[in-house]
């Protein structure tokens, strides 16, 4: 079966990298798009993307969590999180990111195109949150920085945090799928990005899997890799709070320490997982086993998916 590696770097008629979108730094992150699909939108493809997430809920959720932790090394992303002061204690971080996950899960499990649905209201709520934070940051730093906060460029980069790891390393996250399924998932995020106010030019998911992979690899190597080796001063404090927030209980999340998350991520980003203590080595190997089992044992994957569905009270709406 072909893998994402087979298409990464494949030449497109007009291949773009993330640096080509930097003009979006000066543009408001919400283009005021209507709550309707883009022209010639393939709704069937979009809904297949929703089903992909449902079928791989556990793997997609963990991939997003890893991306969140590692992505905090990106100054523009961390800057907004620090500004809101919602990640400065484990309790605040837990509430903040559980709420974020509920939003994301609603977009997949509900119908964001249906007027007044919970999923569409969630989209509107997030757009309003972005608007308020954007205006507050612009006011706070007025005259000190010539750029837009939570800009079109920022929104495009952040989009990769929700789908990038899944499409770049599906098998390592426990996902067995075809390239067509990954393409459908990218298309789903094209639709979500559109409703969040990302212009098509800056929507890294608007041009299919191959271009999305190119964007995500570029973000990983040109932005994340550079920053993860020299993160902002607040990085350690915020990531510690986020990790502590989800370490309670007896589930697999209790086995995730920062060194383990780093090792599981760095081996792809920088090609070296680094040295681990003995306890963290055990935790690392357990997570490798979890991903392997999720990939090869369907009942185990379904079991973990259902645990999340029950915990978050998720019901998939067929459209």
Image: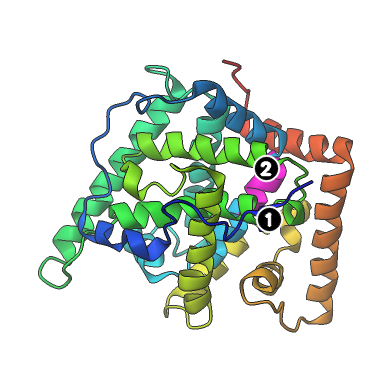
Direction from residue 42 to residue 65 in the image, left or right: right
Q: Is mark 2 on a helix, strand or loop?
A: helix
User: Which class describes the residues within 10 Å of circle 1: few (<14), some (14-19), or many (20+)?
Assistant: few
Query: Does any portion of residue 245 appear in the rendered image?
Result: no
Asked if marks 2 and 1 touch (Cβ < 8 Å), the reply is yes
The quadrant of the picture occupied by the C terminus is top right
Can you identify the residue that label 2 sits on? 179
Can you identify the residue that label 1 sits on? 6
Q: In which quarter of the image is residue 122?
A: top left
**Label located before the other in sequence (2 or 1):** 1
Who is closer to the viewer here, 184 or 273?
184
Residue 304's disc is none
Q: Give the range drawn in magenta.
A: 57-63
Residue at screen point 68% across, 55% down: 6
In the image, which is nearer the foreground, mark 2 or mark 1? 1
Task: Check if residue 299 falls in the magenta segment.
Answer: no
Residue at screen point 57% across, 59% down: 67
What x and y, as percent, mark residue 3? Answer: 72, 51
Q: Give the CA separation, mark 2 to mark 1.
A: 10 Å
Q: In which quarter of the image is residue 240?
A: bottom right
Query: Does any portion of residue 232 appear in the rendered image?
Result: yes
Who is closer to the viewer here, 222 or 128?
222
Residue at screen point 26% across, 43% down: 30
Who is closer to the viewer here, 77 or 192?
192
Task: Check if residue 60 falls in the magenta segment.
Answer: yes
């Amino acid at each position: 079966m072909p893998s994402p590696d087979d298409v990464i770097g494949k030449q497109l008629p007009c291949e773009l990298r993330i640096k080509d979108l930097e003009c979006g730094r000066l543009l408001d992150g919400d283009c005021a798009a209507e709550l309707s699909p883009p022209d010639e939108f393939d709704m069937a493809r979009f809904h297949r993307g929703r089903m992909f997430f449902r079928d791989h809920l556990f793997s997609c959720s963990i991939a997003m969590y890893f991306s969140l932790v590692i992505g905090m090394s990106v100054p523009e992303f961390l800057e907004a999180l620090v500004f809101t002061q919602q990640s400065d204690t484990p309790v605040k971080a837990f509430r903040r990111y559980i709420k974020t996950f509920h939003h994301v899960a609603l977009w997949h499990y509900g119908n964001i195109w249906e007027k007044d649905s919970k999923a569409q209201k969630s989209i509107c709520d997030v757009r309003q949150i972005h608007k308020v934070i954007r205006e507050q940051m612009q006011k706070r730093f007025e005259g000190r920085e010539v750029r837009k906060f939570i800009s079109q460029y920022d929104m495009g980069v952040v989009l990769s945090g929700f789908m990038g790891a899944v499409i770049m390393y599906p098998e390592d996250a426990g996902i067995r799928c075809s390239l067509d399924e990954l393409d459908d998932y990218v298309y789903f995020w094209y639709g979500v990005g559109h409703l969040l106010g990302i212009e098509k030019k800056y929507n890294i998911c608007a041009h299919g899997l191959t271009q999305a992979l190119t964007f995500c690899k570029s973000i990983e190597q040109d932005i994340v890799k550079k920053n993860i080796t020299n993160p902002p001063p607040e990085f350690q404090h915020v990531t510690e709070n986020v990790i502590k927030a989800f370490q309670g209980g007896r589930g697999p999340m209790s086995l995730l320490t920062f060194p383990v998350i780093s090792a599981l991520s760095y081996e792809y980003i920088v090609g070296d997982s680094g040295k681990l203590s003995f306890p963290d080595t055990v935790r690392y190997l357990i997570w490798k086993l979890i991903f392997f089992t999720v990939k090869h044992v369907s009942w185990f994957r379904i079991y973990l998916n259902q645990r999340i569905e029950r915990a978050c009270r998720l019901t998939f709406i067929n459209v």
